[in-house]
Image (cartoon, rainbow, N blue to C red):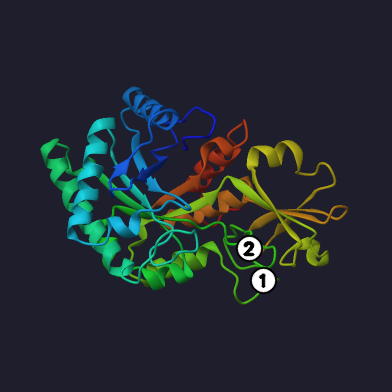
Amino acid sequence: MTAWSPPVPIDTSRITHVNFAFALIDDTGRMMVTPGPAEMRLKDLVAVRRAHPTLRVLASVGGWGADGFSDAAFDPQSRRRFAESAIETVRRYGLDGVDLDWEYPGQDVAGIKARPEDRENFTQLLATLRTHLDTESRLAHRARGDAYLLTIATADREYFEHVEMSRLQRYVDWVNVMAYDFYNSLTHTTGHHAGLHRADTAPPTDRWAEAAVAQHLAAGVPARKIVLGVAFYGRRFEGVAPQHAGLNQPYERYGGDTSYREIVASLINRNGYARHWDERALAPWLWNPGTRSFVTYDDPASIRFKARFARKLGGVMFWELSQDDASGALLEAITLGLQDELTDRP
């Protein structure tokens, strides 16, 4: 859950862990939660856990465009300073762990500082955090199965060129694979931004969730440590070429992000938009031939397939809860998919 999204109920019968987005890294290289609404939202999440003791609340540090990681990871002193501040944050707010969302080590695509040394330094930062969190778990008398957690958000393809995945994975409890945003304002064509498999019409450079997971497995990440990310939002493209109902076509303008709640209310089979389904990619999209508008998104059908796929893994995560529709259809699809037999179809 984010500091800026509208508050929504947390179904603790289906949700096991909540990541608060986002804590930041200050100018001294220390983890911090911004005073004001962000801090109040985090405290509200921890209060939910008091009523539902099985829920776990982590603070996620970073996010797209969040700087400070390269400096925090730079040397033993900076790594220790950051780890000590993370422990202080865990104590202050009564958290169950820390999640690092560094987008991305060794890459400045989001406008943040990056160094070639980030590759090794990220591993060392995680090792330092692991040591501090394990020590704090012992001091807090937390049982081995309830020790403080350390998780990270990961990507695919070039992300692996700038991290030591086979080494760093030993220090984390799991990795949250951001298997979405495969098509966005930085890509030259439309496409499934969160497809499970590769579309027939996709170019050789296409990206999809199954391939992202395979890359993690090939790097030595145990399946139980891989958590598949799904999207509770869509991406919109305007001025799209009409072939294949806009799928994998050039476009004139990126139209922004749209929550699933908004897609249900205004777009699916409404206002000139028709829903299409890609049987190979197991992904839906919307096409409006009148305005040449294309929307790629996840829906209950695609997410249920993904949840089935994730039964071989460590679970499912999503971005983010307030973007589900009022009925909670996407969260329900995750639950159903995790319960389905792998050979069933919805």
Residue 40 position, x and y percent, is 40, 26
In front here: 19 or 209?
19
Q: Amino acid at mark 1?
A: Ala
165 relative to 179 in the view: left or right: left
- Residue located at (46% from left, 30% from top): 10
Q: Which residue is mark 1?
A: 202
> Can I make out residue 346 in this image?
no
In the image, farthest residue toward the front: 27
333 in relation to 189, above or below: above
Q: Residue furthest bottom?
A: 204
The residue depicted at 83 percent of the width and 64 percent of the height is 242
What is the CA distance from the residue labelled 2 to the residue labelled 1?
A: 10 Å
Residue receiving disc 2: 281
Q: Quadrant of residue 246?
A: bottom right
Residue 128 is drawn in which quadrant? Answer: bottom left
Task: For the residues labelled 2 and 1, say whether their Cβ atoms are less than 8 Å apart.
Answer: yes
Q: Amino acid at mark 2?
A: Ala
The residue at 40%/61% (across/down) is 113
Residue 90, position in %: x, y? 25, 37
Earlier-in-chain disc, 2 versus 1: 1
Name the residue located 68 percent from the left edge and 61 percent from the top edge. 279
Residue 218: where, in percent of width, then height?
38, 72
In the depicted view, which residue is nearer to us: 206 or 292? 292
Foreground: 19 or 339? 19
- Nearest-to-viewer mark from 2 and 1: 1
Residue 229 sits above or below residue 263 on the image:
below
196 left or right, relative to 87:
right
